[in-house]
Image: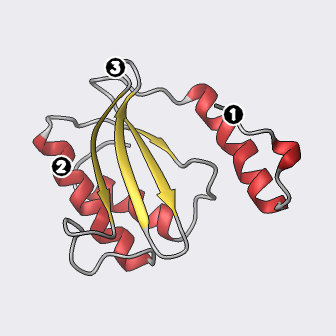
């Protein structure tokens, strides 16, 4: 369900959600080429590999919880660790090409480091 942008008071959040809607119009994941969707909070990162055709999440990696990679967080170093883990899981699922969905976040800092780490580990983004 789409949120009504007029009811949100935070101007930065409205801009991000507008960018997110524009990105999601064109970025679609398939079984051979899943969509990597990143979610960023104040402390953590979460990456999901999604097959939009089957409406199914293949796997997710996050910087919190019991299964979190050691040393991961929202900073650039933590994003590199998460990127390496995502690339390893993609290779386990025999996926070599993905579509990246930045979810309206600007492509700098932790988001750029995450994608660079995925590319360095042999996955085409």
Q: Residue at x 27, y 69 (%)?
A: 65
User: Dots 1 and 3: beta carbons under 8 Å?
Assistant: no
For label 3, the residue is: 54
Q: CA distance from mark 1 to mark 3?
A: 20 Å
Q: Position of residue 50 (x, y in %)?
A: 36, 35
Q: Position of residue 16 (x, y in %)?
A: 71, 52
Q: Position of residue 15 (x, y in %)?
A: 78, 52
Mark 1 vs mark 3: in front: 1
Q: Residues within 10 Å of mark 2 (few under 14, many from 20)?
A: some
Q: Residues within 10 Å of mark 3 (few under 14, many from 20)?
A: few
For label 2, the residue is: 89
Identity of the residue furthest to the left in this view: 92
Q: Count how many numbered circles sit on residues in the image.
A: 3
Camera-nearest residue between 88 and 72:
72
Q: CA distance from mark 3 to mark 2?
A: 19 Å
- With respect to residue 32, does 9 lie above or below? below
Q: Which mark is residue 65?
A: none
Q: Residue at x 59, y 33 (%)?
A: 24
- With respect to residue 41, does 17 lie above or below? above
């Amino acid at each position: 369900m789409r949120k009504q942008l007029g009811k949100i008071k935070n101007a930065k959040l409205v801009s991000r959600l507008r960018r997110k809607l524009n990105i999601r119009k064109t970025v679609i994941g398939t079984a051979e080429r899943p969509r990597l969707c990143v979610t960023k909070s104040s402390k953590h990162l979460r990456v999901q590999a999604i097959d939009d055709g089957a409406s199914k999440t293949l796997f997710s990696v996050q910087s919190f919880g019991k299964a979190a990679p050691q040393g991961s967080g929202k900073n650039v170093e933590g994003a590199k660790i998460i990127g390496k883990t995502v690339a390893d899981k993609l290779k386990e699922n025999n996926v070599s090409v993905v579509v990246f969905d930045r979810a309206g976040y600007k492509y700098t800092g932790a988001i750029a480091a995450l994608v660079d780490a995925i590319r360095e580990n042999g996955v085409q983004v």
